[in-house]
Amino acid sequence: MKRSKKIVLSVLGASMALITSIALVACGDKKAKLTWTGLEDVSIVLGDRYDVTTGITVTDSKLGDVTDQIVVLNEDEHEEILTDLGVWEDFEEFNYNIPGSYTVYYMVTSSNVTEIKDREVSVVKAHNLANGDFSITNKEGFTNWKLDQPGGQATLEKFTDSEGNVNPKFTIGDSGNAWYSLQYINNCNLKEGETYKITVRALSETGKSVAFGFEDVDHGYAMLKGVTVHKLTDSYQVYESYYTADSNYVNAKAVLYFGRMLSSDRGEHSVVIDYINIEKVEKCNEVTFTGLDRVSLGNGWSDFDAKAGVTAKRGDTDLTASIEVLGELSKTVLEGTNYELNYIVRNENGPDAIASRTVNVKPEKAHGYELMNGDFSEEYDYWTKDVNQTDGKGQVNWDIAEDGAAKMTIVEPSSAGWHIMLRQDVSLDGKTNYLISVTAKASINRSVVLEINGKTQFTMDLTTEYKTFEFAYTPESKIGGCRVSLLMGGGGSNNKGSIIYVKNMAVDLDPDQTQYESWQLVNSNFVNGMKSWGFEGTTFTEDKANGAVSTTFAEDTGANWNIQLRQDDRTVQAGQKYRVTIRMKSTVARKIKVEAFSMGDKSKLDASHEFDVTGDFATFTFEYTANKDANDVRIGILLGGSGIKDSTFTISQFEVTKVAE
């Protein structure tokens, strides 16, 4: 914004009304003088409510203090004055919710003297939230805020409350299974070592709970603090929580969580938010807390007392009796949850003493790898219904079919499989073989993808009859939160309106615990059929007796990668040479491409070779050397193309070996 020169209007003159005032000065008491203080430029934090007259005083030499006569010029009432000042074209009215540099004009008329002065007020993005008071609305709702529903269902409306404030009101049909199922999102900057007090003024006629937290956008949206949960009442209350930043975070995701956090959150609810404010505070470091170790609890816990064993002291003075605990815990959860309790000792004469502890509550199950409620007998409990509306089109209705199966109607498939997911996290040990099974069907012939740990994918071609698919998976190392997901989005308009039924999903230990090197292909001779093999665009028939699998192509395809047989998450070492061996045949003579590449960075590995395949079994080989270490290598055969309709492809060996130098 263009900076205007400070102006004393009694000297320069302007509009006719002001010229009259100046004339009166010329004929009257020339000794009347206005003295201003506090006009220094100032910088404030974006989102902090700020009165632009703060710190300014005006004294009339005849009448004394006339600070209450200050008028802040604005667009609605002072267009003529701002025009005469020559600043109307560039004038931008101050708004603490919009970052920038504002020139603010102040006018005082006293003792027939009128003066206008200005100062610059800068609004800088920092720890607070833009539009945290929801004073700026737009067509969708409230500027700077976004409603996300990764596991629940809610509608947002602009609601005028009993105090006359226009605020966001959420009508919740489904709280989901986790705290993050429903989110209202903004962003802010946090600085390492600074402590922040978050206050939320809200109400819920139905006793819904909320929590406010932060996530690290640059590191997989990892939570920066556990959820400090507050159960709302039917009248406005102010709820507080605290966070001390362990690093600098630019554009941290600042989010109000209102998914399922307490057992009472199940069912329909409503929430109204009046404001959310973040302020930097000082902690009293003279108080020492003890007994705040992390605690882990299972569902149904009954013997945890948040204050038991916790002490607070300032020197020799025991302040334990003054400890206040902020936050609530749930006795049951459907997904492991890190609750954060804040421990406060209030100080009327200075900063409060503040400490935190994490209490993890998690479902109890016989084995970490177990999928809970895998038969959907408890409807969708423990499952996350995740709709990522990246392109605004992902829509699904979640029901339970008459036979007890999960029933998912794809209203709009969106543009990618991961936009619609049904998922649950498990814990897997490294170097351990697991079998993942899915029993499912669909209203039409269509494919869905089983995704493990966010990257390993297995395609399932569903028909109108239930089929059980089984896949093998062996993690290289322990995965504490391994996500098992069904990806049901994408597939174009053909999938619009399709219905997917899932009768059972399970993760079990593989009876065969044979260990393979991470660079090897598992079940390379197909004696276990399609076990451990991923595929796409076709269905393979197993011939375990002869150690082979085959597929017959229903149609030609435009690109070879439309049909694949592959394994993911293989590793390679820099400088090591590998030999790929394939034994295969095709009833139609054709070229078939075999490739190996790093899915994340092809500069590490990008190798391929084409082979002329005929109707007789033949063994083919090619060799490659990795440029760099990689642990995300996909090795596969591309089987699509033209002229393949009704032809059959058969493979009996697909093996990788190291080549000695």
Image (cartoon, rainbow, N blue to C red):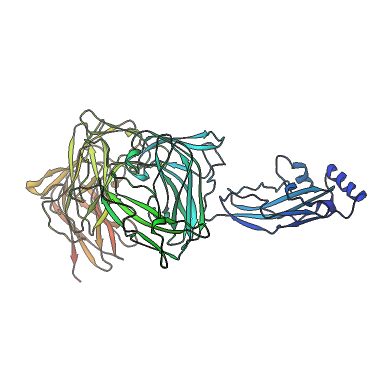
Which residue is nearer to you in this view: 659 or 202? 202
Position above or below: 612 against 16: below
x then y, percent, for residue 58:
75, 53
> At 43% across and 37% down in the image, what residue appears?
204
* Quadrant of the rendering where the C terminus is positioned: bottom left
Which residue is nearer to you in this view: 253 or 535? 253
x then y, percent, for residue 549:
14, 46
x then y, percent, for residue 242:
44, 54
Q: Is residue 265 visible?
A: yes
x then y, percent, for residue 178:
33, 44
Question: Number of numbered discs present?
Answer: 0
Residue at far left of view: 545
Left or right, 545 with respect to 127, comes to left
Q: Is residue 644 visible?
A: no
Position above or below: 323 against 471: below
Query: Which corner quadrant of the image does residue 136 belong to?
Result: top right
> At 25% across and 56% down in the image, what residue appears?
479
Query: Which corner quadrant of the image does residue 461 belong to?
Result: top left
Residue at far right of view: 27
Left or right, 215 with respect to 563, comes to right
Residue at far top of view: 402
Which residue is nearer to you in this view: 264 or 120? 264
Left or right, 87 with respect to 236, comes to right
